[in-house]
Amino acid sequence: MKPLKFFIRADEESLPILQVKEKDVPSYGTSNRKDLASQPPPEKCEQPGPLKYPTAVYLVLGSKFFESFAANGIRSILALFLRDSLTLSESVAMTVLHIFNFFSQFCPIFGAILADSYFGNAKTIFYFMLFYALGYGGIIIATTLPIIEVSMNVLAFISLFLISVGNGNIRACITSLAAIQFKLPEQKDSLQKYFSHYYFVYTMGVLSSKIITPSIRGLSGNCYGMVFGFLGILFLACWITFLIGMFFYKKEDVSRQNILVQAIGCIWYALWKYIKKENVHANWLDSSIGRYSEEFVRDVEAFLRVLRLYIPLPIYWALLAQQDSSWTFQATKLDTTVFGWRLEPDQVKAMGPLLLLLMIPCWQNVVLPLMRRTTGCQISPLFSVALGGVAAALSFICSGILEMQINKAPVESISFAWQIPQFFLLMMGEVLLSIPGLQFSFTQAPATMKSVLTASWFVNNAIGNLIVVAITELKLTETQSSEYFLYSFLMICGITCFTFMAGNYDSRAQVSTEPLPEKYIILTTEKSDKPATV
């Protein structure tokens, strides 16, 4: 095993957080690869003057703020709503919440396919806004109208499912909808700034939802109908803002090809040949050459090389997702008074996005530049991911110790401030793992596989929520503190495996970084030694 490279020279590789090169921009749901390939080089482009920031992008960012506020507002109060209003146990409430998160993280795959191959980004978002609207309408009815309890529960669960499906599929397309509004290469710098703007707007929506939504719940005396009505109004603002943008969005040419489907077909065909012992190649994937182009097979191979690094990481997402579930229930046992003002238990987790907003610019603008100036080196992306996993594991050790102290003391005798260390460590894990990990994947994956890789990243997150569901339902531990320590142990095991795998990762392997060619080899239904082209 090769040693994991801890540091790299500043001139050897540049992976600044929240800065993306033009060729590394995720092609999620986009269909303009052909347009990018046909663009003239920068030195041949006429420069009439700086282009304005597209109006459509402002509208997309505004729509995203309202959408992230509304969706995360539901997550903020969902665990308590299920426990207090639907009278579910805490374990069942946690299960329902993480199933809700699972669909939100798994559905982006379908959104990417539909946007790539059938409707384009704008139309895909529009259609799934309808699912979203039905979900909000249903949850408002279920919590306001005097209907029988059984009907209320069924309607609430159906509505939550529709909201999670709408949220997931919109997430797949809204980022690239704004990205394709820029004219490249003239607006490359503006495109880089857009990704920072997008992340900031999204995080502000999350932070606002975790502060304002629980306040409405507390002031209304746990009137969840009023809370969901407020979130429904925010969603309406999101929908109106998006619809206004329909007058400004660029027309999208749908390619009618989907790289995700082709990649799965390539892998399945190679595995089938291997099972039938028809594979005579040293590399099992090479048996698909002929039915697929060699270039495409090399791209799939590079994609799988990056995907292997994802295998130990779902446990991290299992830890990150519990801010809205087990850590919220922990906050209900704490004294949430600060300077004479009593916070709602589900407001306490606003520490997460607040700390994240402070950490990201500090890490990007202070720590990393200082390290480059003083040592000429910076932390390598894979080592950063490993450090992030350790930070997340330590956060759950803190939460386990706090839970033990809560069990020994009277109710609400311990201040919620003792949750700050676990939130700080978990958010440090997100700075070190989530952002550089995803960006590293983009730089290593070929251009034709970047949208597939983004979908895989969301699936990785979805699997993390399923891990929480499994551990909660199997009841592997007797106490909540023991469960926290179990998660910490699993995180250490996962990040140890990742470190060994990262040490064997060959970053020098050749990958295709060019845009998708006009003629690309796809699966053919005819038996022939020659691949088909379209």
Image (spheres, rainbow, N blue to C red):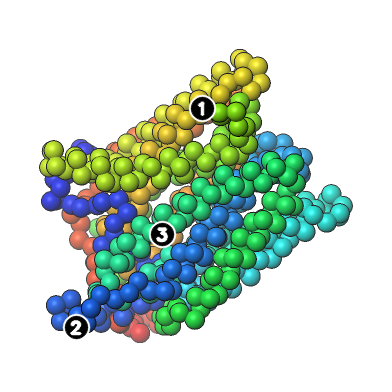
Q: Which mark is residue 46?
A: 2
- Nearer the N terminus, badge 1 or badge 3? 3
How far separated are the C-alphas under marks 1 and 2? 57 Å
Q: Is residue 120 above or below residue 393?
A: below
Image coords of residue 296 (percent x, y) = 30, 70
Quadrant placement of the N terminus: top left
Taking 512 as reference, is 375 left or right?
Answer: left
Taking 271 as reference, is 12 left or right?
Answer: left
Q: Amino acid at mark 3?
A: Tyr
Q: Residue at x 38, y 42 (%)?
A: 358
Q: Is residue 506 above or below residue 33?
A: above
Taking 384 as reference, is 394 left or right?
Answer: right
Marks 1 and 2 in Cβ contact (< 8 Å): no
Tell me where residue 86 sits by quadrant.
top right
Image coords of residue 82 (percent x, y) = 71, 43
Which element is circle 3 on? helix
Marks 3 and 2 in Cβ contact (< 8 Å): no
